[in-house]
Amino acid sequence: MLEGEGFVLWPWRDDDLDALAAMNADPLGMAHFPATVDRERSAEFLTRQREALASTGMGLWVVETEDRFAGFVGLSRVTRDIPIHGEVEVGWGLARWAWGRGLATRGARLAIEDGRRRLGVGDVYAATSVRNARSEAVMVRLGMVRRPDLDYALAGFPDWPGSPHIVYVLAR
Ligand SMILES: CC(C)(COP(=O)(O)OP(=O)(O)OC[C@H]1O[C@@H](n2cnc3c(N)ncnc32)[C@H](O)[C@@H]1OP(=O)(O)O)[C@@H](O)C(=O)NCCC(=O)NCCS
């Protein structure tokens, strides 16, 4: 567990699935994704992140505040076939009620500090749809720098209006 001010980052429990699936079913929260994520895929995500945290120490943590599941934030190794394949990526997603409190920014900072201290993580990348201004704003608040040379289109969604994905980096 990692402790922030007014929130904790916590490994997953089975009963986080309801809140995660509800968050993934929120059309506004998912506005910058080409497709929604159903309960079955949410369950796979939960299991994958829990196992990653347990086996490698690197994964997306649950953000918990006021004893509630507020979303997730953390680090992962990029396995998707994109220009930052093999690099460490920071990612976040919050339930709507938890937006506007700095939880993504503060949670990401905590997860990055932990990854650097405990796992020797160096440069950290982040990617989002060019239309996802709130996610890009988190990157800017973290002090990350845009890398326009690493823009990419999501495979399988050539005409998606959210293209391209843009990439930021926080150099060590
Ligand atoms: C992307 C997402 C996590 C950003 O959430 P967010 O709440 O806007 O970002 P933060 O948690 O960093 O909060 C920042 C806001 O809290 C405010 N804030 C309050 N206290 C703060 C603090 N201590 N530190 C930083 N910001 C603080 C900031 O001023 C900012 O307010 P604003 O929205 O009025 O500009 C959220 O929009 C989301 O979950 N979207 C759907 C999923 C998604 O798109 N994920 C990313 C895919 S790439």
Image (cartoon, rainbow, N blue to C red):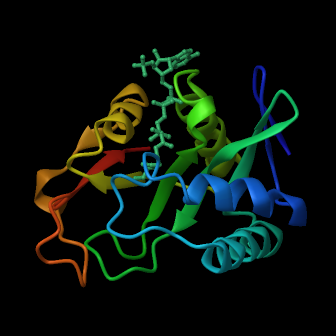
Please tell me which residue lies in front, 150 or 8.
8
Question: Is residue 132 left or right of 76 when viewed as pictured?
Answer: left
Q: Residue at x 39, y 79 (%)?
A: 80
Locate the C terminus and report the quarter of the image it occupies. Answer: top left
Place residue 41 in its image quadrant: bottom right
How many discs mark residues in the rendered view? 0
Picture layout, residue 157 above or below residue 73: below
The correct choice, above or below, for 33 with respect to 29 in the image is below
Closer-to-camera residue (147/95): 95
Residue 99, image x, y percentages: 54, 29
Inspect this view and state whether residue 5 appears: yes
Taking 155 as reference, is 11 left or right?
A: right
Above or below: residue 32 compared with residue 52: above
Q: Residue at x 72, y 75 (%)?
A: 43
Residue 55 in percent (x, y) is at 79, 75
Camera sees residue 119 = no
Q: Residue at x 39, y 54 (%)?
A: 125
> Is 36 placed left or right of 15 in the picture?
left
- Residue 160: give x, y in percent of width and height: 17, 68
Q: Position of residue 98 (x, y in %)?
A: 62, 31
